[in-house]
Amino acid sequence: MRTLTRFLLGTCFALTTASAHAQTTRPSLTGTWAGTLMGTLDFTAHLTDPAGGPRTATLDIPAQQAKGLVMQLRTPGDSVYLSMRQPVAAQFAGRRSADGHQLVGEWQQGLRSFPLTLSREGSTGKVSGPNRPQTPLPPFPYQSADITFKNEKAGVTLAGTYTVPADMGPFPAVVLLTGSGPEDRNSTIMGHQPFAVLADYLTRQGIAVLRFDDRGVGQSGGTLAGTTSADYTADAQAALAWLRAQPGIRKNQVGLVGHSQGGTAAIGAAILPAGPDFLVLLAAPGIPGDELIVQQSLAGARLQTTDAAQLTTTEKAQRAMTQIVQKTPDNAQAKAQLMAYYTAIDPQLAALLEPQLAMLTTPDYRSILADRPAKTLAKVRCPVLAIGGSKDVQVPAPANLAGIAAGLKTAGNRDVTVKELPGLNHLFQTAGTGSPAEYGTIEETFAPAALQVVGDWIMRHTQKQGTP
C-alpha cells in the first residue's frame, strides 16, 4: 500500500519537485547517524553539514564490508536526502524528527523501498520501533493460516495468510490487493501494516480474507521485474479461484479489495470471466495514467509552495518527462532524452536524478502511463465501493473518484458508492498535510472511520445468503 512513495507514481513526485523545495535554515546534521535496515543490516552515515559550506556524506555497511561509500546530501526544508550512484543506485529519503535527533524515512534501491530510521550518535539510544497500536496481535478470535496458491498460467506460487471467522459459515470473502512496487501481504510501510489491520477488522466482522505477498516478496515465488498491472490482475484471478474453492465460502460473494495500483488490477479482473462479485477500490486511479502523474506531482508541489511560477514549472517538467517516455519506446534513448532535459534545467539536479531515471522506463511504469481507467470501468457490472482521502496527494481523491463514478455510469452500473473521506491521506491515516513524509510519523495505521465504511458496505452487500 509501494520514495516515501512506494505507492503509485511516487518516483515522479520526487523527481519533479526536487528542485522546487525551498531551502530553510535548520540545525546542522554534522555527525554520525546510525540505523538498522530490516532489523538485521546496520547502516552508519557520516554527515558534514557546515553553514554555507559544501556538504559531504559517506555510508558504512559493515555486514557488506562497505566503508566510506560516497553519497550526496541534500536538506530541503525538513527533508533529508542521501543518494549514491556507485556501487548501486540507491537513496535514503527521510524527514527530521521534531527533536532533530532522528531521520525517519525509507531506503530506496531500484523499485524497492524499506523503512529506515537513522539516529544521531549520542542521542537517547537506538529507536525501539514506532508505536503502532492498531497492529493486530494474537491470540485472534478467528482462524489464521499461512497458505500458498498457484498462478498456473504464469507458473508462479504465491504465499499468503488466510483468516476465517470462528462462527459457522458459509462466509463472504475478499482478496486484498496491495499498491505498486514490491509489497508483502501486510502492505508493510514504515512500521505500519495496513492490510493486517484491514484483514483483522473484516474477519472480526464475519468476512474471510486472503492477503498475499507480491511476486518475489516474502514467501512468494517469481519476480516483479518486468511485470505490469496485467500480471497482477492474473495473480488476483488465481487468488479468487483459490478462495472460491475453500470450504465454508459463499462462492458468489467473493470480492476484491484493491489499494492504489491494486485497484487497477482489481478493475482488470472484474471484466474477465470468473471475476469478483464486488469491488472495493481504495485510493484507486480513475483518470488517465499520464494525467494522474501530473496531478500527483502538482499535489505534492503544493505542499511545498504556493508560488504559481514554481507550480507551472513543476507541471511543465512533469508533462515533458511523461511525453518523452511515451514517445520513445527505446529505453536507452528515453533515458538519454530525460537526462538531456534535466541537464538543460539544472546539471547538478540531473546528476542527482540520473540513477533513478531507469525506473521511468520499466514495463510497469510504461503501463501506468498508458492506463485508461475509463475504458475498463465502462465494462464493470458488479457492485463497487470507491473511497479516497481528501488529503491524498498520490492519487488525489476529487478527480479520481469522479473518474471512477463516470466510468461506472457509462457501464450502466447502478450499484456504485463513491465517498471522499475527510482528513485522510493515501494510506487512509488521519493526516496533517497528506505528505508521504508524514506516513511514518503518524501512529494511526488505518482510520477506524475508513475501516467501518469498508466493512459496513461489504456486509450490506453480502447479507443475503448466497449459494454455498
Image (tube, rainbow, N blue to C red):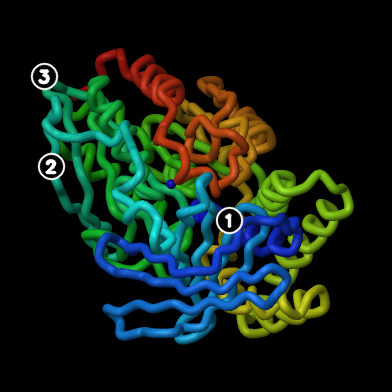
**Circle 3 is placed at which residue position?**
168
Amino acid bearing label 2: Ala
Residue at x 26% of width, y 31% of height? 200
Q: Earlier in the sequence, mark 1 or mark 2?
A: 1
Instruction: Reply above or below: 419 against 228.
Output: above
Q: Secondary structure at mark 1?
A: loop
Say which of 191 and 355 sits in front: 191
Q: Determine the image quadrant of residue 373.
A: top right
Q: Secondary structure at mark 3?
A: loop
Instruction: Reply above or below: 109 against 397.
Output: below
Instruction: Reply above or below: 421 against 108.
Output: above
Q: CA distance from mark 3 to mark 1?
A: 42 Å
Q: Earlier in the sequence, mark 3 or mark 1?
A: 1
Amino acid bearing label 3: Met
Question: Mark 3 and mark 2 in contact (Cβ < 8 Å)?
Answer: no
Task: Say whether residue 227 is left or right of residue 30.
Answer: left
Residue 145: numbered disc: 2
Considering every residue shown, the one lying at the far front of the view is 122
Q: CA distance from mark 2 to mark 3?
A: 17 Å
What is the x, y in percent for residue 319?
77, 60
Is residue 337 visible in the rendered image? The answer is yes
Would you call the spot at circle 1 few (<14 residues within 10 Å), some (14-19), or many (20 or more)?
many
Residue at x 41% of width, y 33% of height? 444
Residue at x 25% of width, y 26% of height? 207
What is the x, y in percent for residue 105?
47, 56
Would you call the spot at circle 2 few (<14 residues within 10 Å), some (14-19), or many (20 or more)?
few
Residue at x 12% of width, y 23% of height? 166
Q: Determine the image quadrant of residue 153.
A: bottom left
What is the x, y in percent for residue 411?
59, 32
**Circle 1 is placed at which residue position?**
9
Question: Mark 1 and mark 3 in contact (Cβ < 8 Å)?
Answer: no
Task: Say whether residue 448 is left or right of residue 128.
Answer: right
